Every structure is written in structure tokens, then in C-alpha cells.
């Protein structure tokens, strides 16, 4: 049924249709509306049987989900930004224990300085924690990926993060096709855990593992992620058969068949990039787009095959590793290794900075003539950066960087330097 609703509401409805038995909630912007919506559904009796547990922190939220899932309950939670960092120990524990928890990450920048707007730094900080990571381009895809995530998680007995851009998607009102309960029940069977705590059949979960077996245990975690490379497309195919639309999978391509230049990105920015590519195509430029849905496991073969004819690759990413540069682009380079095609890293949209068609157009025109730097920060204000660097050279007590930048921009009252 078509419904005009907020992205957070769409996700809450999708989670509810997946029949979770335990929801652990601690609010942090911009995911709060998701757990609020689920709380209302539980309180009204629309989602039952389900226990909605308010906890005192994000660490507690995932810890309770771990306990509930280990006891055999379909479990869900959501977080963002600093909240994901606060639960970091539990994030590793959930995957290490092989528990199929589904968690929404409403992507938001990490401080300091404090910033509540969107980028992908939070999810990327946990990219090696053993969770599957699926990135949504639209609210429809966010809705669909949550339903698929429960199926994937429970088949592999691995946790899944569904990542959606904070505010850009979570608070945007769009039309979505909301499935009915019968469709979801046909696609998602009742939860049958691969492991469960049972007093009548006691086992140890979370045992101490020494050097004699730790490498093997970690390799098996990797092996399960490799199994997901086959399972995720299978689940997407089954989803299309029941729901009638393409959603999920490992990657999605747009105008790549004859493209000399291919742009790679994750999340909602793909819409802006596709619009820009349409304009460039109208001008005769052969440009295409590759969107990564599954960032973990990373679809090396699919990316390698989809970019084989391209002369160059431009990776636009809303994150970067301080001290070295791109994160996603490094993985892309591993996929296309031993090829002559350059892979350009474009860091964009940090802390919610708008990524405009005009800016994307300019950088792609530069890339097509190979005049783009290998590492570029889109729309970076070099005048501000240089003033701060010069001030630090001139004055040892030059003050905090963030406050200095705001002062230079006139955002806060100026003071003596």
C-alpha cells in the first residue's frame, strides 16, 4: 500500500512487520523517531508479543539485545554516532557470539567537535567489527532492507547493520510502498535460532578461547561474511518475487555499460549523482554510477566486473581516515588492483555539508580530463584552513581549532588571538 510518511516511520513499520520479540531502546538523534514509533506500536498492542525495553545507555541497549537474542528472541535496536561508539565493545561481542541482531544506524557525524548532521563516519568506525553493513539509498530501500536484514541475519546467525542517512532519510517524507503482514510473513519465516541458551541443554556461549583456536574462530567469522556474498543476492531475488520490486543485493549500477568514468558511492547521495550523470550524458559524456549496498561483506568481484571497461573511477565518500585519506576508495582499489585505471578519492558531505549537483558536475568534468587530485575534499574552504595553519605557526597558544574556524567564519564572537 502506498503511504506518504517519514523515513523513520517507514523503518519502524518495517521492523514491526518483521515481528521482533524484543526491542531495546535508547534515544539519540537522528534515530529517535524509529524507536519512538516502535514504542507506540508496542504500547497500543499493534505489535505483540513484543517486549519494549527502555535502557539507560546505548551500551545497555545492545547488551540487552545480546542477552535476548542468546535466549532465542528475535531482537532489534537502533543507534547513531556517539551511541554506536559507546556500544563498541558490545558490537564486537554480538558478532563474535554469532547473534542475528538487526540494528539501524541512522548515520551521523562523530565529534569532537559536536555535530548532529549526516556523514558515514559512525558506521565506518565499526566496518571491521564482523557485522554485515547494508546502506540504503532511499526510504523505500531502507524499509525493504530491514525486512531482508532479519532474513539474512537469521540464516547466517550474524548481526546486520542497516545504515540510512540521518535526517536526509530518517526525517524526510517520501512515498513508500508499505507491505502487508501476509507478504512479510511469506518472506520472513518465524525465528529459528541456530544457537540458543536452554537450561535443558546447557552450552557455553562466549567461552575463553586461547591462541590454539582463536585464529580459526576469527577465520570462520570471515567465512560467514563470504557466505553472505551469495546469500544477499538470493534474498534480494526472493524479495522481488514476493514484493514486486528490486531492492537490496550487493551493488546497483546506472548507465555503466559504456561508461568511461564510473562514480562509486553509498547512501542517499546516489540520487544527486545520478541526476548529475543524466545531465552529463545529455552533453555527450559517458559517465555511470555504481552504488554499493553491501559494504560488509565487500563485493570485490561485482565491483571489479562492473568497472572493467571504465578508464577511471571516482569514489565519493562521506568519511575518511585521518592521516591517510579515503576508506571506501581503498577497498575499491583492492577490487581493481593490477589495472591501470586511476581511482580518485573525493571526500564530501562531512558533518552534513550539502553535496550539490553543481559541485559534483565540476569534479566529474575534472576527473574526465584526469585533472582531479587523487585525494580531493569537495568544496573545502582553503582560505579558512590556511588561516588556521598560519595562526598556529605564529602563536603557540592559538586555541582550539574548531573555535578558531568558527571565529574566522564569523559564526561566533571574535576574540583576541
Image: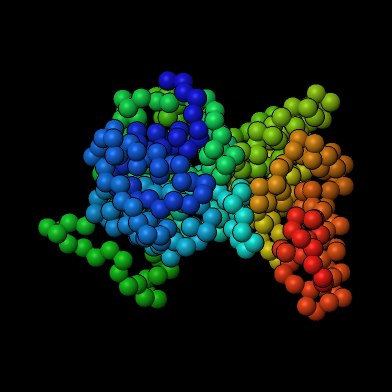
Q: Is residue 128 left or right of residue 117?
A: left
In the picture as drawn, the residue positioned furthest to the top comes out as: 1
The answer, for residue 387, to whether it is visible in the render is yes
Marks counted in the figure total 0
The answer, for residue 293, to whether it is visible in the render is no
User: Image point 31% across, 25% down: which residue?
Assistant: 182
Please provide percent x and percent y for residue 203.
21, 63
User: Image point 70% across, 47% down: which residue?
Assistant: 353
Please provide percent x and percent y for residue 301.
59, 44
Please provide percent x and percent y for residue 351.
66, 51
Q: Is residue 258 left or right of residue 49?
A: right
Q: Nearer the viewer, residue 363 or 350?
A: 350
The quadrant of the image that shows the N terminus is top left
Q: Is residue 301 left or right of residue 7?
A: right
Q: Nearer the viewer, residue 190 or 81?
A: 81
Please provide percent x and percent y for residue 411.
75, 55
Amino acid at each position: 500500500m502506498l503511504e506518504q510518511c517519514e523515513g523513520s516511520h517507514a523503518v519502524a513499520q518495517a521492523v514491526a512487520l518483521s515481528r521482533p520479540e524484543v526491542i531495546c531502546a535508547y534515544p539519540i538523534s537522528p534515530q529517535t523517531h524509529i524507536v519512538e514509533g516502535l514504542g507506540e506500536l508496542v504500547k497500543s498492542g499493534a505489535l505483540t508479543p513484543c517486549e519494549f525495553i527502555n535502557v539507560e545507555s546505548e551500551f545497555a541497549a545492545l547488551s540487552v539485545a545480546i542477552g535476548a537474542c542468546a535466549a532465542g528472541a528475535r531482537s532489534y535496536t537502533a543507534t547513531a554516532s556517539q551511541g554506536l561508539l559507546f556500544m563498541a565493545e558490545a558490537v564486537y561481542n554480538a558478532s563474535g557470539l554469532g547473534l542475528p541482531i538487526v540494528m539501524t544506524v541512522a548515520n551521523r557525524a562523530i565529534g569532537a567537535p559536536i555535530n548532529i548532521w549526516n556523514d558515514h563516519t559512525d558506521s565506518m568506525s565499526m566496518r571491521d567489527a564482523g557485522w554485515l553493513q547494508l546502506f540504503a539509498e532511499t526510504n523505500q530501500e531502507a524499509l525493504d532492507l530491514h525486512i531482508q536484514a532479519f532474513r539474512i541475519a537469521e540464516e547466517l546467525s550474524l548481526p546486520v547493520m542497516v545504515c540510512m542517512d540521518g535526517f536526509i532519510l530518517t526525517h524526510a517524507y517520501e512515498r513508500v510502498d508499505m507491505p502487508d503482514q501476509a507478504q512479510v510473513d511469506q518472506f520472513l519465516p518465524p525465528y529459528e535460532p541456530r544457537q540458543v541458551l536452554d537450561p535443558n541443554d546447557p552450552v557455553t556461549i562466549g567461552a575463553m578461547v586461547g591462541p590454539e583456536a582463536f585464529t580459526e574462530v576469527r577465520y570462520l567469522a570471515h567465512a560467514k561474511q563470504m557466505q553472505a556474498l551469495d546469500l544477499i543476492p538470493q534474498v534480494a531475488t526472493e524479495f522481488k518475487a514476493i514484493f514486486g520490486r528490486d531492492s537490496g543485493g550487493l551493488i546497483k549500477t546506472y548507465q555503466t555499460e559504456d561508461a568511461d568514468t564510473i562514480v562509486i558511492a553509498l547512501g542517499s547521495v546516489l540520487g544527486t549523482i545520478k541526476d548529475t550523470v543524466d545531465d552529463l550524458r545529455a552533453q555527450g559524456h559517458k559517465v555511470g554510477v555504481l552504488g554499493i549496498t553491501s559494504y560488509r561483506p565487500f563485493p570485490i568481484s561485482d565491483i571489479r566486473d562492473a568497472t572493467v571497461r571504465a578508464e577511471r573511477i571516482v569514489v565519493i565518500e562521506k568519511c575518511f581516515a585521518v592521516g591517510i585519506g579515503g576508506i571506501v576508495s581503498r577497498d575499491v582499489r583492492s577490487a581493481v588492483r593490477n589495472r591501470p585505471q586511476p581511482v580518485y578519492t573525493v571526500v564530501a558531505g562531512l558533518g552534513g555539508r550539502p553535496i550539490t549537483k553543481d559541485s559534483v558536475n565540476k569534479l566529474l568534468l575534472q576527473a574526465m580530463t584526469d585533472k582531479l587530485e587523487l585525494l580531493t575534499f569537495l568544496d573545502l574552504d582553503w582560505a579558512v584552513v590556511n588561516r588556521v595553519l598560519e595562526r598556529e605557526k605564529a602563536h603557540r597558544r592559538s586555541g582550539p581549532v574548531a573555535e578558531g574556524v568558527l571565529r574566522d567564519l564569523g559564526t561566533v564572537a571574535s576574540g583576541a588571538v
